[in-house]
Amino acid sequence: MEQTVEQYLEFGLRNLWYPVLASWEVSSRPVGITRLGENIAVWRDENGAVHAIEDRCPHRGARLSLGWNLGNRLACWYHGVEVRFDGVVEDVPAVSSCPMTGVKCVKSYHVQEKHGAIFIWFGVDDAEEPKPLSLPEQMGNDEWSSFLCMADWKVNYQYAVDNVMDPMHGSYLHSASHSMSEGDKSAEMQHRATEHGFIFEKVGQSGVNFDWVEYGETGSPWLRLSIPYKKQFGPGGVFWIVGFATPIDENNTRVFFWRCRQVQGWQRDVWRFLYRNHLEKLHWDVLEQDRLVLENMAPNARQHEFLYQHDVGLSRLRRMYKKEAQKQLQQWQEVKTRQQGEDLVSANVNAAQQDKVGNHG
Ligand code: FES
Ligand SMILES: [Fe+2]
């Protein structure tokens, strides 16, 4: 059955980098995750480099992440098959010679570690090289200081994206929060193009509440906004949020929010101290309000909506996603056709090898 654009989008657009884990979550033990519906084993080698391969042992399908970290490869817990970072089987210790050895049997992923998180490339065509990844400056450089905060929400990622594309909810859902209690409760909204995407904003009010949001794509899709802090929260000015919604599967999302301030020297220390001891809790309360609403939306809410002027931003982004999904679906079909041709060839090779195995018996 042909996949529709909507079905394709349930698992997330591809040809993009996504943050999948915080750096601190991966040490020497392999970690098994699901992102964009794919099971992936992630580990760090002895030099600290992070690797990611399909979390499926080519022998009989055990999860490789349950096995052992041998540096440049994982050993399956079930019967010891060793699979390298590039997906090639390095050794099958249980038998003296095995046709699996030296063959690329599982998918391997491109990985980058940046700003305290691990990013993985999800392509449509594995034969294609990934796009370069650049990220908003707020996430960390000499002038900026940031904290990464993550949560897993039981909702499709599209709801999480829509939520950030909707600044007006700040004045209602978060009206009792530490940062969003001020400003007008009604507004005109407008959008304008930016270098990497577009801004959706309130007309005539900025620097008061959650008044604007920017969608951008620089190899990875992000959302950016700023909200003023009250005076008592250290060195004045706004704080910034750069957010990502990474699909886990069609019903679950991991959200990543970098909370950032442009502070240096002692002010940076003050803010980092205040954040850890006071602000982090307040931010969590806000995020919990979002989670509560999103996890309890009506079934298939996105299919029965009555949108109004404040939803122009999310409608615009949905149209962009849809257009891109159409392109990717077509590319996907082409890749499938090509692979079917390749499979036919390797099926013949396999049949010859199975004959050999049979002969040993
Ligand atoms: S299933 Fe992994 S070695 Fe057998
Ligand atoms: Fe919110």
Image: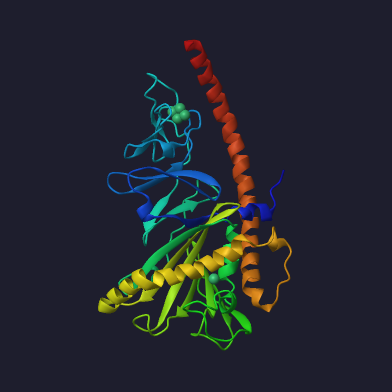
Position of 223 with respect to 147 (left or right) is: right
Residue located 50% across and 32% down the image: 61
Which is more toward the observer, 344 or 258? Answer: 258
Is residue 195 something one can see in this rendering? Answer: yes
Is residue 136 something one can see in this rendering? Answer: no
The image quadrant in which ligand 2 is located: bottom right
Which is more toward the observer, 259 or 132? Answer: 259
Residue located 72% across and 67% down the image: 305
Exactly how many numbered labels are in the figure? 0
What percent of the width, then of the height, locates residue 128? Answer: 50, 49
Quadrant containing the N terminus in the rendered view: top right
What percent of the width, then of the height, locates residue 273? Answer: 31, 72
Where 248 falls versus 303 (above or below)?
A: above
Q: Residue furthest bottom?
A: 204
Position of 29 with respect to 108 (left or right) is: left
Residue located 50% across and 20% down the image: 353
Residue located 49% across and 63% down the image: 244
What percent of the width, then of the height, locates residue 243? Answer: 48, 66
Position of 226 with respect to 190 (left or right) is: left
Where 230 falls versus 117 (above or below)?
A: below
What percent of the width, then of the height, locates residue 281? Answer: 42, 69
Q: Quadrant of residue 175?
A: bottom right
